[in-house]
């Protein structure tokens, strides 16, 4: 009988992965990995993926194909003797990671993380091992590794990886510092919650050494029969056992939520059919529920000193129209054409100045004022800069709301665009993918909105060469690629069809 080969090539002279929280090697520690080892795993994983309804795995399959095709092209153009086949054992000396493979590798890791399944998360870890083996100061790889570890439930290891990322950057545009603080505070609150449960039910300790699965199932069965006192001791015992064995954080969080829901039902919560308990018991349970909710929120967005975000005022489409009516407006591109210019005084002379995403300020070249900041929700560059109005764009309502909760900075804006301004081209213009297939840029969403409202006597685009001159952004964003999901040719054609006059630096639409 032959032994089946595992799809995961063993990394020579590297320890096997450890479970989160088992007290051995931190998963934030890079396991030395050769490029060929990772490429073989990617090829094997690509072969396992089949066409289906899971769009996330479809996107991963496309990223894997692109990586392998790029690798083949690099190998064909490399000088010297023909390289060894992809599935052949690599040489002891390893293979250098070419620059051309850096972005495709990270794209595979990000797509694998998006899938969220165990095999794909393992692949994402392997990708970061590979990149960080040769590029120990890769910010993108450290951030990806931290996000993967967080998805695996290894929060303490994720915090360590996030800290490695923070040590390498000056501008925290992705809100990693707040995320790290939230994970730390959440872990402390989770520990406090478990201690309170343990103190309130001393008999639970007798079940903390037993099988988590069996103890939990027994507790659920007892709760179903209405024997809450016995059920409680077993459920809390199972929770303590999860903590002791280092179970992934999402599993502990799910079990805590289920336990508290059963406790509320047993306490006679409205509509539950349970039997009311004493006022003291109810107060204690309310304290536990409040602590549970607080630590869940903290994990999501980090500690928030001001939950009202400085008294920010939501602004609707109609209110935004009235605020800009009759005013001259200029939109400033994040391009080298602006960065190398001397247009600052002219820009500041407009009534309203609109800037985008990771804009960079050099008063002589770009002007010094920003009245409206239009940004995509996926990163937090410049969200701490004070502006009168901030419009945050996003295609998926839930993701957009999550970003606002996590990234909005109290006191940094007076007005914030509401849901009616979330995705102008699609939601207001009703332009579906059949009309406009590509994802519109922040600049185009803003420009389309202003053109649609048509209340500005002067509407100028400054430095819009659609990245022909290169990007001009804050330093932390300069290494971000000019993404391929946007179709700049169509946006340029739309602009030129409506242009009243065009110079080297300025396109006038009004």
Image (cartoon, grey):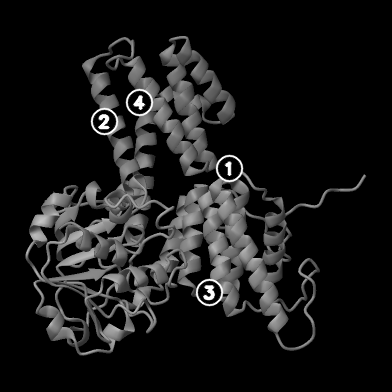
**Cα separation between marks 4 and 2:** 12 Å
Nearer the observer: mark 4 or 3; the answer is 3
Q: Are marks 4 and 2 in contact (CB under 8 Å)?
A: no
**Cα separation between marks 1 and 4:** 47 Å
Quadrant where the N terminus is found in the figure: top right
Q: Are marks 2 and 3 in contact (CB under 8 Å)?
A: no
State the residue in front, 162 or 373: 373
Q: Is residue 154 visible?
A: no
User: Where residue 97 sits in the image (x, y, percent)?
Assistant: 62, 76
**Cα separation between marks 4 and 3:** 47 Å
Where, by quadrant of the figure, is residue 173 drawn? bottom left
Q: Are marks 1 and 2 in contact (CB under 8 Å)?
A: no
Residue that mark 3 sits on: 136
Mark with earlier residue (4, 3) = 3
Residue that mark 2 sits on: 287
Q: Are marks 1 and 4 in contact (CB under 8 Å)?
A: no
Element marked by disc 4: helix
**Cα separation between marks 2 and 3:** 45 Å
């Amino acid at each position: 009988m032959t032994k089946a080969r595992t799809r995961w090539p063993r990394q020579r002279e590297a320890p096997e992965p450890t479970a989160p929280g088992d007290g051995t090697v931190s998963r934030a520690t890079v396991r030395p990995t050769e490029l060929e080892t990772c490429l073989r795993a990617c090829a094997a994983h690509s072969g396992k993926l089949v066409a289906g309804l899971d769009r996330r795995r479809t996107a991963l399959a496309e990223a894997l194909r692109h990586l392998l095709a790029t690798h083949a092209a690099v190998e064909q153009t490399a000088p010297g003797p023909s390289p060894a086949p992809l599935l052949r054992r690599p040489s002891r000396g390893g293979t250098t990671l070419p620059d051309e493979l850096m972005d495709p590798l990270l794209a595979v890791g990000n797509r694998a993380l998006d899938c969220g399944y165990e095999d794909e998360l393992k692949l994402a870890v392997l990708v970061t091992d590979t990149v960080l083996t040769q590029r120990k100061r890769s910010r993108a790889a450290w951030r990806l590794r931290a996000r993967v570890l967080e998805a695996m439930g290894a929060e303490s290891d994720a915090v360590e990886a996030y800290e490695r990322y923070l040590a390498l950057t000056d501008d925290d545009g992705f809100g990693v510092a707040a995320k790290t603080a939230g994970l730390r505070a959440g872990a402390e609150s989770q520990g406090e919650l478990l201690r309170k449960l343990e103190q309130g039910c001393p008999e639970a300790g007798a079940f903390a050494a037993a099988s988590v699965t069996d103890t939990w199932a027994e507790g659920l069965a007892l709760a179903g029969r209405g024997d809450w006192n016995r059920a409680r001791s077993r459920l809390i015992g199972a929770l303590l056992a999860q903590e002791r064995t280092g179970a992934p954080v999402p599993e502990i969080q799910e079990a805590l939520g289920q336990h508290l829901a059963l406790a509320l039902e047993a306490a006679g919560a409205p509509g539950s059919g349970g039997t009311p308990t004493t006022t003291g018991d109810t107060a204690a349970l309310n304290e536990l529920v409040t602590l549970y909710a607080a630590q869940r929120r903290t994990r999501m967005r980090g500690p928030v000193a001001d939950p009202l975000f400085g008294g920010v005022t939501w602004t609707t489409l109609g209110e935004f129209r009235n605020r800009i009516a009759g005013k001259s407006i200029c939109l400033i591109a994040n391009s080298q054409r602006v960065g190398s210019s001397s247009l600052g005084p002219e820009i500041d002379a407009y009534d309203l100045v609109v800037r985008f995403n990771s804009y960079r300020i050099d008063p002589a070249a770009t002007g010094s004022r920003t009245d409206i900041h239009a940004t995509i929700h996926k990163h937090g560059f410049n969200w701490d800069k004070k502006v009168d109005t901030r419009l945050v764009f996003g295609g998926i309502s839930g993701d957009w709301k999550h970003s606002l909760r996590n990234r909005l900075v109290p006191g940094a804006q007076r007005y914030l665009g509401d849901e009616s301004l979330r995705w102008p081209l699609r939601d207001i213009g009703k332009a579906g993918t059949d009309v406009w297939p590509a994802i519109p840029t922040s600049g185009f969403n803003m420009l389309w909105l202003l053109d649609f409202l048509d209340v500005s006597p002067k509407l100028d685009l400054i430095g819009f060469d659609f990245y022909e001159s290169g990007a001009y952004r804050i330093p932390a964003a300069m290494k971000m690629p000019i993404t391929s999901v946007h179709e700049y040719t169509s946006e340029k054609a739309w602009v030129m069809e409506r242009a009243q006059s065009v110079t080297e630096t300025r396109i006038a639409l009004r």
